[in-house]
Amino acid sequence: MIHLNKSKLLAINAALAVLAVAAVALPALLPLSTPAVKAPPRPCTQPAEATTQVQDLQAYTVIYLKPFSRPLADAPPPPPVAPPAPPPFVARLMGTVQEPGFAYAIFSLPDGHERLIALGETSDGICVKEIGEGCATVLYQGRTIPCKAVRQESPTPASGPYAPGMPLNRPLVPAAGGVR
């Protein structure tokens, strides 16, 4: 009986194998016929809405032309340039004159000239703001500069060729007819 069942199983197994091969080979051997559907030909002209879309896209060309491949971080700003140093104050205060109603400061300039500048006046870029005894405060190139008078020793009659009461910048000239 086991022998009989074995032969039946083999026959069923062989029939199933033939059916499986036929199921795979049959569609490959028989062509399927389907009616061909042709699409209608497309016209060569663009519809009006396509041209307006192109015009709308032309408005974005500014964005398309921007360079978006720049560095992720901006470069550090350049270091600030220090302003040039103002020119030094080279005038020297030679003295001051103060009387009721007026005050003057006498400055010696580098070119050898002297300037007599009244309180509140400006000469050669020097503006006198305040005058004291032997000192003055000036405004020069936007800076306030205190100045002290340069002391000059006046020669005594015994040590120099000057007579008392004569200006110091004029040498003593002997009078006509004699030597002093």
Image (spheres, helix red, strand yellow):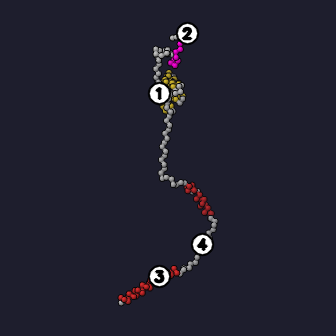
> In 3D space, how far apart are the residues under numbered discs 4 and 2 (Cα atoms)?
141 Å
Q: Which mark is residue 39?
A: 4
Image vertical order of residue 64 relative to residue 173, above or below:
below
Q: Residue furthest left?
A: 2
The residue labelled by disc 2 is 177
In the image, what residue occupies the spot 62% across and 70% down? 41
In the image, what residue occupies the spot 61% across and 72% down? 40
* Residue 177 at x, y percent in the picture: 55, 9
Q: Is residue 45 visible?
A: yes
Which is nearer the eye, 180 or 32?
A: 180
Query: Does dot 3 land on a helix, a strand or a loop?
Result: helix
Q: Which residues are magenta?
A: 167-175
Is residue 169 in the magenta section? yes
Q: Amino acid at mark 3?
A: Val
Q: Quadrant of residue 7?
A: bottom left
* Residue 169 at x, y percent in the picture: 52, 19
The residue labelled by disc 1 is 147
Q: Which mark is residue 21?
A: 3
Query: Does dot 1 land on a helix, a strand or a loop?
Result: strand
* Residue 168 at x, y percent in the picture: 50, 18
Residue neighbourhood size for the residue with mark 4, other residues' Cα within 10 Å, grouped as few (<14), some (14–19), many (≥20): few
Quarter containing the N terminus: bottom left
Image vertical order of residue 137 relative to residue 73, above or below:
above
User: Tag 4 or tag 3, which sits nearer the N-term?
Assistant: 3
User: Tag 2 or tag 3, which sits nearer the N-term?
Assistant: 3
Residue neighbourhood size for the residue with mark 3, other residues' Cα within 10 Å, grouped as few (<14), some (14–19), many (≥20): few
In the image, what residue occupies the spot 38% across and 87% down? 6
Q: Amino acid at mark 1?
A: Cys
User: Tag 4 or tag 1, which sits nearer the N-term?
Assistant: 4
> In 3D space, how far apart are the residues under numbered discs 3 and 1 (Cα atoms)?
121 Å
For this view, does 53 lie left or right of residue 20?
Answer: right
Q: Amino acid at mark 4?
A: Ala
